[in-house]
Each structure stands twice: as C-alpha cells, then as structure tokens.
Amino acid sequence: MAHRLGDIACQVGARLEGDADCIINSIAVLQDASPGSISFLSNRKYRKFLKTTRASAIILGQEFLDDCSANALVSDNPYLVFAKVARLMTALPAVEAGQHSSAIVAPSAQIDASARVGPGVVIEDNAVIGARVDIGAGCVIGAGCRIGDESRLVANVTLCHEVTIGRRVLIHPGAVIGSDGFGLANDEGVWVKVPQLGTVCIGDDVEIGANTTIDRGAIKDTVIGDGVKLDNQIQIAHNVEIGAHTAIAACVGIAGSTRIGSHCTLAGGVGVVGHLDIADHVHFSAQTLVTRSFTEAGHFSGNLPAVPTHAWRKSIARIRQLEETAQRIKTLEKQCRKRPSKDPGQDI
Amino acid sequence: MAHRLGDIACQVGARLEGDADCIINSIAVLQDASPGSISFLSNRKYRKFLKTTRASAIILGQEFLDDCSANALVSDNPYLVFAKVARLMTALPAVEAGQHSSAIVAPSAQIDASARVGPGVVIEDNAVIGARVDIGAGCVIGAGCRIGDESRLVANVTLCHEVTIGRRVLIHPGAVIGSDGFGLANDEGVWVKVPQLGTVCIGDDVEIGANTTIDRGAIKDTVIGDGVKLDNQIQIAHNVEIGAHTAIAACVGIAGSTRIGSHCTLAGGVGVVGHLDIADHVHFSAQTLVTRSFTEAGHFSGNLPAVPTHAWRKSIARIRQLEETAQRIKTLEKQCRKRPSKDPGQDI
Amino acid sequence: MAHRLGDIACQVGARLEGDADCIINSIAVLQDASPGSISFLSNRKYRKFLKTTRASAIILGQEFLDDCSANALVSDNPYLVFAKVARLMTALPAVEAGQHSSAIVAPSAQIDASARVGPGVVIEDNAVIGARVDIGAGCVIGAGCRIGDESRLVANVTLCHEVTIGRRVLIHPGAVIGSDGFGLANDEGVWVKVPQLGTVCIGDDVEIGANTTIDRGAIKDTVIGDGVKLDNQIQIAHNVEIGAHTAIAACVGIAGSTRIGSHCTLAGGVGVVGHLDIADHVHFSAQTLVTRSFTEAGHFSGNLPAVPTHAWRKSIARIRQLEETAQRIKTLEKQCRKRPSKDPGQDI
C-alpha cells in the first residue's frame, strides 16, 4: 500500500509542504511512527510529539506547521484529511461473492449474485439482498427484509421481519433491528401487549454500533435518516425518527415517538424521554436527561461532574436543604426591609 | 382480516357509537387513516387530527366523543381497547411444528412435538421444550433449560445452563439469560471469581427485550415474577427478585440481591444499587439513581433535566459553592440576631 | 462432591473452629441450609440467621463467632474463603476436546487438539486457538484472532478480526470484541468514517460480561490489563486502556482514548468522557459522570439519590434559582455592611 506523498495530497485535497516524492507505506501515531509512516496531530495535547516523531509526513493544521520538521499535509480539517488518507491506504478488497455452504437461505429470498452470504447466516422468506452486500457469519435476516446495495452486516446481527436497510449501511455485531417496541396497556394492574405493527426504515450511509437496538414502530415505522451514525449500545424505541447526519454516542436511550432533528449530536449516556421534538443542530452533553422539546438549535446539559465523595455528600445535603435555605433568606430580607432608617435603596 | 365493527366492539368490550355493520380491514394512525381503517386517540396532542381523519372508526375516551365524526369505540381505557383490537386483527398464524434440518439438538433434550425449532438453533443436553414453543434462528438453549408452553424466543437469544422459562414468555433477540453474576472476592488486590451456583427463574407471561441481560444467582436464584415486562438493554444482576406485573423501561440496571416489588414501574435509565428492598407500587422516573430501600408506595426521582449549557455551568458552580453559601447565611443571621433593638421577633 | 471440613479448611486457608470430620456436601445460604451444607455470612444484615440456620458449617469473621453454634471457618476475609470453598466444591469437569461436526473452521485456522469447538461455531482464516480453550455454541471468531490457553467463550460471543485474548479469560454471551471504534470526521455537515486500524488486546485472567462491547483502536490498540473484571453491558471505546485488576460494574461507558489505572473500581452506570487519565486506586460511585482526569487515588461521586418526586421538583426549582439566590445574599451582605454603627466585627 505504498503511495507517493504528492499523490496522497492530491487525492485527499490537502496542501503539501515538503517532498512530494516521499513514499508513505504505513499509518502510525506520532509517538510510534517510523520512517515511511504518515501521522496526524489530532489533539493539542499531543503537540509535544511533533518535535520527536520519526514520521515521514504529518497531517496538521496551519497553526502547528512551524513546529513540524517532517513533510506536512496542511488543512483546516486535519482529522477529515486523516480519514481520507486512512481510507485511501487501507481500502478493503472487494467482497467475494457467493453463499457459504452452511448458510440457510429461504428459496423465496432474492440474493443478488454479487452479494456475499457468510457461514451460518440465516435468511428467511422473501428477503431481498442487494448488490455487493456483505452478510457476515451468524447474521439472521428476517422474512421480508430488504438490504440495499453495498451494505455490510459484520457478524451476529439480527434483523427482525420486514426491516428495510438502505445502501452502504454498516451494522456491527450484536445489533438488533426491528424488535418489538415496548407497547403495553394496563388492564387493572396486568400489562397487555400492544402488537407492534410498524417496522424500521434505515436510510443510506448509516452506521449502527455493536449491540445497539432499534425497535419497530407501533403502527407507523421507526425511521433513521441518511448518514446517521450510531455508536454501540444505543437504544432507539418505537416510532422514533432521527434526522439526517445526526451522530449519537454510546449508551444513549431515546424513548418512544420522539423526533430528533438533523445534524444533532448526543454525547454518551444521554437519555431522551418520549413524545418530544428536538430541532436540527441541537447538541446534548454526556449523561444529560432530556425531558422537554427543544425547538431551537443550541447546546444543552444537565449533568453533574464527579468530585471527591466527601465533598459531594455535603453538596447533596445542602441541595436537600435548599427549600429551608430559601426560607431563611426570605426571613433575612424581611428583617432588613423592616428597618425604616436602613432602607437599602437609600444606602446605595 | 376484515371484521364487522359491531363484532369488534363486542369482543374487546367497548361501547359502539355508530354503524355496527361498518367493515374494518386495517389499523392506522389518525393522520394516515383511510376508509376501512380503525384508529385511536392515544395522546391529547393528536386531538386535532380527529376532525380531518379519514378513519372509519376511532377508539377514544368519552371526553373526545363530541369531536369525533367517525364511528367510535368508547372506553375508559382506549389504549387497552386498541391493544385488544390490534391483537384481534393481527393474530399470528399458529406455529408450524418441527425442527429445521440445520438445528443441532442434543439427543437427551425433550422437545414437544408441537414446538418449532428454527434454523441454526442449538439445544444442549437435557433441555425440556414445551408445547407450541417457538425457538427462532440462531438461539442457543443451554443444558438443562426448561421452556414452558407457548413461549417464543425470536432469534439469537442465549439461555445459559439450567435456566427456567415460564409459559407464554416472549424473548427478543440478543437477550442473555443465566450468565454468571458479577461475584468477586478480593485477595490482596487480585479479584477471585466466586462461582455462581444459582440460576434464573422466569415466570409466566413475561416479556424480555432485545439485548437485555439477566444474571444467574450466586447461591439462590434470580427470580422474575409473572407478567413482568422488561424493555431492551436492561441489566438484572444476580439474586435480584422482581415482583409480578412490574414494568421496566430500557437501559435500567439493577444491582445484586435487590428486591423490587410488584406493580412497580422503572422509567428508562434508572439505576438501583444492590441489597435494597423496594415496596410494591413504587415508581421511579427516568435516570433516577436509587441508593436506599423504599418501603412505601410512591413516586421517586432524582434526575436533572437538560437546560442550556451556559446556564447549567453557572448552576454547577453554585452547587459547588453551597457549603460556602450556607456559611454566609449563618453569618448574616448572626449579624441580624446580635442587634438587640432589631429583634426580628419584635418586628413581626 | 463430599468433603471433610478439616480438609476444606486446610485447602482454603481458614481457621477451623469445630469438628474437622464433619462431612460437607452442599453450599446454601444461611436461611435455606440443611445438615451437610456450608454457608457464609456475607452481610451484617443476615446476622440474625446465624441463630436459626441448620448449616453444618459457616464461613465468617471472628466478630460473629460468638453468635455461631455450628462449625465455623474463621477468616479476616470470609467472602474470599467462600469463593475458594465454592471453587473447590463445584470444580467443572475438564473440557471435552474436539470440534463439533457443525462448526465451520477455516482450513488456515490453528486449533489446539485439546480445545473444544462447540456447535455452530465459526472460526475464520488464520485464527489461533490455544490449549484447552472452550468455545461455546454460536461464537464467531474473526480472521487472525488469537485466544490464549484455557480461555472460555460461553456462547454467541463475537470476536472481530485480529483480536488477541489472553489466557484463562472468560467471556459471557453476547459480548462483542473488536468492533469498529466510533471515529468520524465532519465534512461540511456530513460524517466521514475514519477507518479503525488498531485492534483489541485482552490480558490474562480477564472476565467480560454478557453483551459488553469493546471497540478496536483507531491506530493503536484498545488494551485491557491482566485480571480486569468487566460486568455486563459495559461499553469500552477505541484506544481505552484499563490497568490490571480494575473491576467495572454493569452499564458503565468509557469514551475514547481514556486511560483507567490499576486497581480501580467503577460502580454501575458510571460514564467517563474521552481523553482522560485516571490514576490507580480511584473509585467512582454509581452513575457518576467523570469529566476530568483524576491524578490521585480516592473516592469520587456526582450522583443524586432518589427522593419523593414532589420534594425533588422543589429541589430542581431551587437549583434553577441558585444564581438569583446568590445575588440576594450579596445584596443582604451589602445592606449589613453599609451600617457603620453595626459593624459585625464589633458585634462579635
């Protein structure tokens, strides 16, 4: 996978400072790089390694160029350039078409001849698998599912019946798509299951992390927009809609019928209650609980960063006393106000 | 699946207002309904669609009847009526008995002749599978497990050894039942595994969500009562007991040996620490952390809803200062008290 | 599995008080024990059962010995003694070597003759499986993985390509190791995937819980140290490093490139943001959010225990007013300070 640095710069759209003929044959972090490596500066705290790295080329922003003695690919968005370089240098071989002899494929399923169906895969009735789709070992594709061209299910992914997956979707192991939504009616204390009649529609260019779960809709569908990126262990409840190009970090849970806009980011551990409407370009910080709709773009938070436990215990006690504290302040204000000759307005 | 509206009303126990001979052949949400559809009003915010819906019949409460120009099924509990209608209209075909040729069933396992064993299923030694049980593709049933009549494991479910599942239990993909509890003894800094000798007993009519995990007991069993409903990605630790008809939303974690009562509800993301006792009819709101036993029914919370990040940063700073604030108030009170002629008692 | 009590005491290193010839043939909790059982006192709240238990022997600390009428195994660390007794009495039979006929093993994979490969297992190209390794039903072992001697994958575990697992590692069902890290660069609103070129290295004697996910590194590897114990449904992001003998409870999420020290404990539901450095012997309590590095050992918290919902609503309202409260206190202090004849310093 050796590439000329000048060719790399050209293909990824970065400005080259240095030797265009330098040959790059590996990718490494700054502190481990050796000659022939390309590296990048992703985080200001690693700046110190610029002086000592043995990398042959470094992807960085203009502001770090003076510190860099190696060849440089300069960009306003060095991380994006790195992504492009890494994709260029590690292109996967084309999928080897064909069905493994151990795969169990229903006769009524339509599998494109260019698709790969791995060992132990189960594909049920009337499923439709597109061109160059890659279905890894142990996946279960339920009846009536449709998977768009060039999508990849890595391994042990479960699609329940009738789920639709777009093109170039990447789904990691353990993900479950199309399980029943949590619909329950209460009949004098006993829960009665509400049949979940909708399904799940996943757009194009979506990535779904390991052990993430996306429930099918109750009547209408659960919808994941184009370009949405979901990390691991996310829970998406029935009838949720997520707008295009929203990115959601691990361990987030979104309750039923909530609509998340486009270009949002939800940091790890965020919880969103049901039936809300979140605008485009809304950003929630880690572990925040969202209990109301947010109709304007912005950054929202509600988390409590860790402090030493003994100090935190005092804070909790004081939080418990806030009601009493408010009463004491009111009393003090009354006392001050009652003294005619000491009117605070006069004092100031 | 066409039904006469009068027959539906009869079977689900709702009061019919309108044409008993109207034929219903589909279910839809109000805003998408077409003639022949039955719909329901689940949430006051969708009331506006009553005027424009094309549904032939609507399930609703008495209070909305005046706004409804279609036929109506009236009930105090419209969501329950909807559940019954949906079950009536979407009844699944009976399970097709038999073992798929690719299933791997230990000779010592006892599989009822009316059960279905799907493709790629593994059933280990001495497992006992009841009548009309449906085991979907890729499930693994450990040695000595027992599954009661009419239960369904959708796909890729794992039951570890000796787990007992009741009747009419529904388990969604990726769920793991009977994995080892997290039992560790510390030997001068090194963790020593404590064998987990109990198992898991699941009652009748339980539903278990996708990727939910229920650990086996350390010595005694982990016990899930009849009618309990568990959403996706819930973690139930060893020796937890959950009382009948309790419903738990997604992403909840319950630590070891805690007992949850009957008819409780835990909203999404709740965490419950170990060795607690929670009474019947206790309700915890989303993302609440439960650190002590609650011996009386009631609603409990401890979460912090999201606000704009800049405002929240100020709140955190003020929370950090609460100890200092308390001292300042005490000083102010002392100052006011020390002035004999301004005794607050006299002022009031 | 009958053992002489004197032999047990000897092998587990506890002091015997009572009859060395007593025969022990089962393990039970105090309240369910019968003659022949050994039990233990794990939690002060079960002390009351000491008087009524029918156990033949009890493992306990010196401080409870006076209350105990049965034979006793006395130790400073009764839980550790119990772990050893339970391991002694429930030793598993040796793994039965061999590959199940339904397993799909790439010809280039190297499987030690003493390993067991269960039904429906898939082992891909060039994987190397050590001595006495036990791979349960439905596991998928990606290309180039290496699994050290005596490790056990219970069932339905997924290892993506090139993952390295140490010796005596125990991995529970549904765990996914080596899935892609969540690496995304933003190209004018569209997320571009950053290839994840590293892998995951798991040390010796590690335990990994059900449905836990560990992502592969972006360039370098994600590293889990020797003796680390991970409970269920934990998410470990790319390039995280976890030091030896750290124990992490269920539902914890650790974001990318964070380094956790050795001998730490993270209680259930903790979230740790990315690029942090956590020292050895740091302990975080349940549901705490960690947003900065902690360079010293200690206990840290930031959670809010549940209280009745009506009281909590008032607390939230007061927290929202903290900014205003601070202003009111400042005003009061100014008023008090402005009265020359009432100098608080003189009053005291």
Image: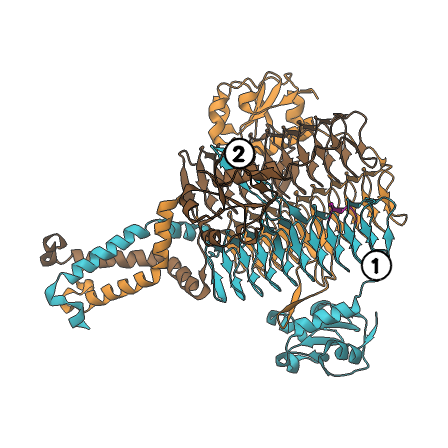
Chain colours: A orange, B cyan, C brown
Examine the rendering and report whether any part of residue C274 can be seen. no
At label 1, counting other C-alpha atoms closer than 10 Å, the crowd grade (few under 14, some 14-19, many 20 or more) is: some
At label 2, counting other C-alpha atoms closer than 10 Å, the crowd grade (few under 14, some 14-19, many 20 or more) is: some
Label 1 marks a residue whose chain is: B
Viewer-closest of A143 and A65:
A143
**A182 up-or-down from B174: above or below:** below
Q: What amino acid is at disc 2? A: Val
The residue at the far right in this view is A107
Quarter of the image containing the C terminus of chain A? bottom left
Report if residue A110 lies within the magenta region: no
Secondary structure at badge 1 equals loop
Residue B334 percent coordinates (x, y): 18, 58
Left or right of residue C278, residue A10 in this image = right
Left or right of residue A329, residue A236 in this image = right
**B132 up-or-down from A231: above or below:** below
In the image, what residue occupies the spot 44% across and 33% down?
C279
Viewer-closest of B183 and B120:
B183
Query: How far apart are the two marked residues, 1 and 2, measured between alpha carbons?
Result: 53 Å
The image's mark for residue B272 is none
Residue A321 percent coordinates (x, y): 34, 59
Viewer-closest of A230 and C170:
C170
**C333 up-or-down from B52: above or below:** above
Span of residues in magenta: B137-144
Report if residue B139 lies within the magenta region: yes
**A329 up-or-down from B140: above or below:** below
Residue C278 percent coordinates (x, y): 46, 35
Label 2 marks a residue whose chain is: C
The image's mark for residue C12 is 2
Residue C151 percent coordinates (x, y): 66, 31
Q: What amino acid is at disc 1? A: Val
Q: Which residue is mark 1?
A: B95
